[in-house]
């Protein structure tokens, strides 16, 4: 099924398939933080993230969110529509943490109601800077109408994800998603949703069950991903 390697990112590889409009996404075990400054490998992370992301995507698609996912090929690979990724990191924050705390001094753990929506320019050489709509339009990343659509999707996805995680005893602190354009211009959710791209705190204990365990050298990284995977799997 997999043919030529088209692109290799920090955590995934994209392969062509016999169909030019479809790709296979392979989830690697690599982890990076701080724009690649810190690197490690965690055995089984790719499989866990692929499965976690697939379960979440299926739920979102049942709720009428359009995504790039067609089906899983195996536990580490997904067949997806080929899209042009929009070079924006779309971030939704329900609780203050991470760069928000560092940037404007909100106390970690402060509830944000309504949630804060942010866009960062996906460009490593500038360290993925926070930008506004006018910047995104000036960069030719998207039109104002497309950004309004994306913001609507971010809010819908946040509502579904908050409820889904709460069902399995997790507070959704924040997350990053990406969007892509299909051949006909339709904008769909792309990339992964996993403990690599979300902050997930246990609702009862506040324990961090996400990539911050790697970023902050807390240990127990793969155990946390396994716990997230188990809770989602038990739900279905
Ligand atoms: P931040 O607090 O570091 O800006 O991160 C906000 C959320 O976005 C957090 O859940 C982690 C996620 N994220 C990524 O998935 N990739 C990235 O490159 C960055 C900076 C954040």
Image (cartoon, grey):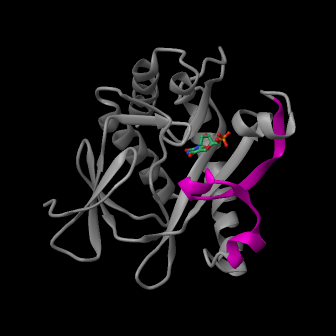
Question: Residue at (55%, 27%) from the top-left corner?
Answer: 215
196 vs 43: above or below: below
Q: Is residue 27 left or right of residue 16?
A: right
Residue 200 picture location, percent across and down:
59, 31
Image quadrant containing the C terminus: top left
Residue 147 picture location, percent across and down:
68, 72
Q: Is residue 48 left or right of residue 63?
A: left
Image quadrant containing the N terminus: bottom left
Residue 17 picture location, percent across and down:
19, 68
Question: Residue at (41%, 64%) from the top-left corner?
Answer: 68
78 vs 171: above or below: below
Q: Is residue 86 left or right of residue 144?
A: left
Question: Residue at (65%, 75%) from the top-left corner?
Answer: 139
Residue lying farthest front? 125
Q: Which of these two is toward me, 119 or 183? A: 119
Q: Is residue 156 left or right of residue 87?
A: right
Residue lying farthest bottom? 184
Q: Which of these two is toward me, 12 or 202? A: 12
Residue 123 on the magenta segment: yes
Report the magenta residues as a range. Answer: 110-138
25 vs 195: above or below: below
Q: Is residue 163 visible?
A: yes
Q: Which of these two is toward me, 117 or 56? A: 117
Q: Is residue 195 visible?
A: no
């Amino acid at each position: 099924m997999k043919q030529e390697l088209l692109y290799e990112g920090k955590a995934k590889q994209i392969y062509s398939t016999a169909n030019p409009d479809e790709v296979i996404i392979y989830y690697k075990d690599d982890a990076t933080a701080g724009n690649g400054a810190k690197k490690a490998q965690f055995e089984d992370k790719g499989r866990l993230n692929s499965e976690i992301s697939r379960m979440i995507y299926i739920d979102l698609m049942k709720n009428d969110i359009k995504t790039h996912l067609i089906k899983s090929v195996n536990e580490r690979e997904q067949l997806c529509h080929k899209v042009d990724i929009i070079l924006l990191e779309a971030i939704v924050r329900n609780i203050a943490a991470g760069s928000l705390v560092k940037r404007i001094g909100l106390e970690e753990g402060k509830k944000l109601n309504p949630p804060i929506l942010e866009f960062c320019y996906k460009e490593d050489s500038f360290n993925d800077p926070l930008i506004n709509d006018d910047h995104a339009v000036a960069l030719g990343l998207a039109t104002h109408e497309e950004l309004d659509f994306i913001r609507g999707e971010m809010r819908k996805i946040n509502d579904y994800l908050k409820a889904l995680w709460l069902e399995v005893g997790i507070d959704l602190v924040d997350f990053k998603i990406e969007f892509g354009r299909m051949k006909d211009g339709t904008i769909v959710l792309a990339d992964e949703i996993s403990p690599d791209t979300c902050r997930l705190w246990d609702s009862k204990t506040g324990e961090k069950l996400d990539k911050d365990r790697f970023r902050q050298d807390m240990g127990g990284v793969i155990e946390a991903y396994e716990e997230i995977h188990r809770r989602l799997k038990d739900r279905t």
